[in-house]
Image (spheres, rainbow, N blue to C red):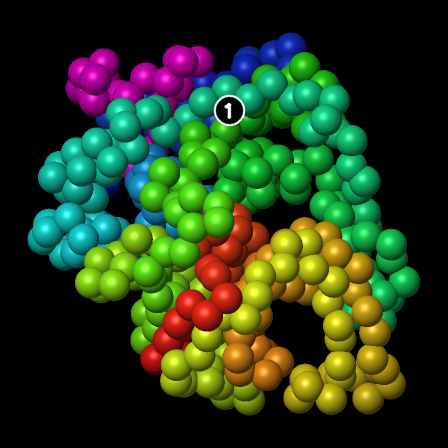
Amino acid sequence: MKWPLVVLLVSQAAAHVAVSPYVESDYIRGLTPKERGQTPNGGVVNGPLAAQVMLDRAGFSPGEIDGRAGRNLQRALVAFQRVQGLPVTGGVDEATWTALSNRAGGQPPLVTHVITPEDLAGPFVAVPADVMAQSTLETLGYSSPLEELAERFHASPQLLEELNPGAVFDVAGARLVVPNVAAIDPLAPLPGSRPDATIVVSKATSALTVEDKDGALLFHAPVTTGSRHDPLPLGTWKVTGVERMPPFHYNPRLFWDADASHAKARIAPGPNNPVGTVWIDLTKPHYGIHGTPEPGRIGHVQSHGCVRLTNWDANRVAQWARPGMQVVFK
């Protein structure tokens, strides 16, 4: 896969300056300032990271942004190229990069974020792996400011650490380099409207799409769908409701791999709740479209039958979902 944009990134974290592992200075000497894609703080990003950010802004989510080429990025590129009428390669050529840049409004891939007291307000929680132990907690919040900031910018915690070598993430006023993800989805319908759209989940491509009445793609995101024990229930269903920050009602009888000692339990809301920050309920009993406490696993592992997205992608789907909207599992 060819990545035409490779550039220098220098970040200022706290009181010292460090160079991130994304530096490829021998290559960038031959690039013009325009090709370098300078950001406000003098940095630019490598090809996979730049493509991930631009795809996220364009509504073709690569899932968790990690700066590395992988299946989720390739699938997002394929979907974007098809919609744009470009040669479908799953890579970034000049035409694809131009289309991505135009779709993103010419925005730089990276921006600076200054940590605020609100970023550090928490509550931060050490979440145990055992679901019964989780049921004793009052909230399933983020484990640290780093995890909270990573999710806000649709990134892996490791990427933020790599972009900001030696940075501290728990001090107000610290300056960070972060992915320039969009705060508002420009294609999302207005609150209270009833968009004529369909949610489609494809087992073959491990992707969820929102499509208009003519089949035009409005949003694309990677998903985790079912397993051998809990296969995706193929067919046509409907949305019955949308709940943000839902509790999780655990019933061990619904999980083939549940511990025999487990009992029914209520898991408090929070981003590290087993269903994340959104539950989109369906007419299929016990099934829904929802978020996750483990965004890095989306598109790579199996689930217990439901459709799982990153929390930020689940929130974007929730902007479209309305009671009665058709949902196709295929």
**Above or below — where is 162 with respect to 240?**
above
Quadrant including the C terminus? bottom left
Q: Residue at x 58, y 61 (%)?
A: 242
Residue at far top of view = 15
Instruction: Look at the magenta stretch and give its main secondary structure.
Output: loop
Residue 330 or residue 261, whichever sits in front: 330
Q: Point out residue 35 in the picture as x, y percentages from the top left corner.
A: 21, 22
Relative to 39, is 251 on the left or the right?
Answer: right
Q: Choose between 218 and 168: the one closer to the eye.
A: 218
**Residue drawn at the location 34% of the way across and 43% of the way down:** 187
Kindly indicate the quadrant of the structure image that contains residue 236.
bottom left
Q: Is residue 89 magenta?
A: no
- Extreme residue in the right direction: 136
Residue 26: percent from left, percent from top: 27, 23
Identify which residue is drawn at 54% across, 44% down: 156
- Measured as percent of width and height from the top left, residue 228 is found at 50, 87
Q: Which residues are magenta?
A: 29-49
Residue assigned mark 1: 177
Residue 281 location, x and y as percent? 57, 70
Of 253 and 238, the residue lying toward us: 238
Quarter of the rendering containing residue 95? top left
Viewer can see residue 269: yes
Up the image or down, 270 lies above or below 262; here it is above
Q: Please indicate whether residue 299 sits to the left or right of residue 16 in the image.
A: left
Which residue is located at x 81 percent, y 47 percent? 125
The quarter of the picture where residue 46 lies is: top left
What kind of element bears circle 1? strand
